[in-house]
Amino acid sequence: MMTYYDHFVIPFLVGTFFMFAVLLWKWGRWLWMLPGEDKRAVGRGIFSAETFRAVREVVCESLLHRKIFRVNPLLGYMHMSLAFGWFLLIAVGWVEAATVLGPGTPLQAHVFFRYFGPEGEAGWNPFAFVMDLLLLMVLSGVLLAWFKRMRSRAMGMKRTTRHVFVDRVALTALWLIFPLRLTAESFTAAIRHNGGFLTGSLGDLIASGMSAATVADLNTAAWWAYSFALAAFFIAMPFSRYMHIFTEVPLIFLRRYRLRSGPREKSFDNFQIQACSRCGICLDPCQLQRDLGLDNVQSVYFLRDRRYGKLTDEVLGNCLMCGLCEARCPVGIELNVLRLNSRQKRVDSPALMRYDYLKGADRSSGSGKVGYFAGCMTLLTPATLQAMEKIFAAAGEEVWWADRDGGSCCGRPLKLSGEVNAAERIMERNKELFRKHGIATLVTSCPICLKVFREDYALEGIEVLHHTEYILRLMRAGRLDVERTPDTFTYHDPCELGRGSGIYEEPRELIRSVGRLTEPAHHGAEALCCGSSLANTVIDDGQQVAIGRAMTAELEATGAKTIVTACPLCKKAVGRAASVRVADVAQVVAEHLRVAAEVPCGKVRTEPVGERIAAAEAASGR
């Protein structure tokens, strides 16, 4: 019985067994440490249709890299040729070895088939042809990877990630594996004539230029080198960025089973953190890098440093959490959530009671099934609040005002800083207030408040709307009438409203109802951050202004007379840099309202109130 053994297989076997031992240990520990609720979700999900959907997603994203293709086709091909090409080399090679050598052959006979396989036969060998074609495909990906490191801009990337030592070891080994495989199989083809169109041709060239003894010696040396390259990659892989190759697969399944990261760290986070390939796709969109030249705090470095236990406050706190990187991430890692729970671990304390003073008197006013929560920033931009008052009045809506005269924060700013326990106490106070007054619909002008109300409050029986959604509902119901003018507007999508809450069209429909809308270069899901994010605890005011100025320049480049946004924080930020008027969507609608006015003979006419509102706003300096 053939043993299919040579000493050069030892490095490969050692590396393979080591890699799978570490993988099983890591996966086993992370799964064992999952909360009971997550374990039950996995149990329910395994025997559901989600498992089949997960398999499909693994093929589409882990092998074919469909999302990267959509962003950058050349980069997508590079990743696909390496991932899918290598997978097919293994799969087809396994079939070839099982067909030719018979079932039950040892692992090394599959991996080093050209060495252990039989002599080549006359005629065309379909297996050898397909294997050479696949090897050529993978080699093209390696060449593109080499080129990307040297000329990233030619590959559509302004920057690539900086790697730690173990990443460089794994990367070097990976780059060597396939050229060494080509070399080894070509030398064997020179001796045994079992190559395909690529290795066979190179084998013929080698045989014609070297003696048989030299070819035999170099053949053995080439297989040793190939085996060592595989071993080096397999040993380094679980500790390098290439851990993503295996970790992304269980992550896809677990996400399909409804597992998510939360405000506090848990073992599921490890699947997300180590599924990051550090591909660098998230680097170019970052405004901290583009506008401020900060190139060591991006999400890829946050994940890297958290993984290796080297996370600093500088990297942790220096993020706008605008969601641009998360929207680009081909793996779909919850980057903002992971940052937040890292901050909670560093900052929060179960005994933190510093915000108990906020649980005091009820300062709300009015009554009605519709409640309005202005939020801290809206109270600092009173023109928006005044516009909402006029809109409610024009629609005949009775409103319960949660904080017109001041009140409690929604809690999200505390959560963004990592003080989750304090935030939860404020949330409980607010929920008690909403229940007490029996509201059915809660409207807010602040996207920050909107996001936390929808995601963290669990307001059963209470509909939560941004004021753009609510105003549009009133208009569609015929409760508001606006005058259309030839005025030109451009719209800035706030991060928390657009990428954070998926609200893009409602503000635009409102603007189009009163004038012409022109879009800036970056809009919708690609919109830029205003720079004044409450999430960044590191950059100073001057740096915030610099980011806001760069973003505002895009808005002004549209030539619009008015820049419109739907976030009080963005309104202030853009207003600091703009040379044209800046207004909230609610202001624009209120200024173009038609209101009933009595005229002689008992007739009723309608007239816009925009000039009155604008004059009042100018007089108040708001």
Image: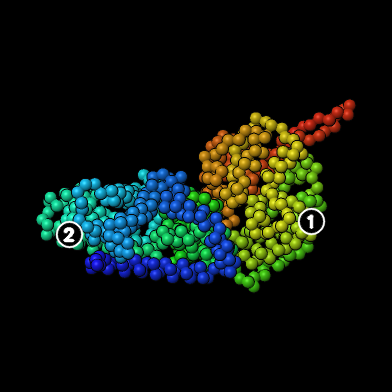
Residue type highlighted by circle 2: Leu
Where residue 539 sits in the image (x, y, percent)?
A: 53, 56
Point out the residue furthest to the bottom here.
351
Circle 2 residues within 10 Å: few <14, some 14–19, many ≥20: some
Q: Earlier in the sequence, mark 1 or mark 2?
A: 2
Residue shown at 37%/63% (left/top)? 237
Where residue 367 sits in the image (x, y, percent)?
A: 81, 52
Q: How is the image coloured?
A: rainbow
The Cα atoms of the two marked residues, 1 and 2, are separated by 83 Å
Mark 2: secondary structure = helix
Q: Disc 2 marks which residue?
A: 218
> Can you say whether 350 is above or below 274 in the image?
below
For the N terminus, give its image quadrant: bottom left
Q: Quadrant of residue 62?
A: bottom left
Residue shown at 78%/40% (left/top)? 394
Residue 301 visible within the image: no
Q: Quadrant of residue 620?
A: top right
Mark 1: secondary structure = loop
In this view of the protein, which residue sits in the foreground, 158 or 370?
370
> Can you say whether 593 is above or below 227 in the image?
above
> Can you say whether 592 is above or below 219 in the image?
above
Residue type highlighted by circle 1: Gly
Residue 133 visible within the image: yes
Where residue 349 sits in the image (x, y, percent)?
A: 61, 71
Residue shown at 41%/59% (left/top)? 245
Residue shown at 75%/55% (left/top)? 402
Point out the residue furthest to the right here.
601
For the C terminus, give its image quadrant: top right
Closer to viewer: mark 1 or mark 2: 2
Q: Disc 1 marks which residue?
A: 438
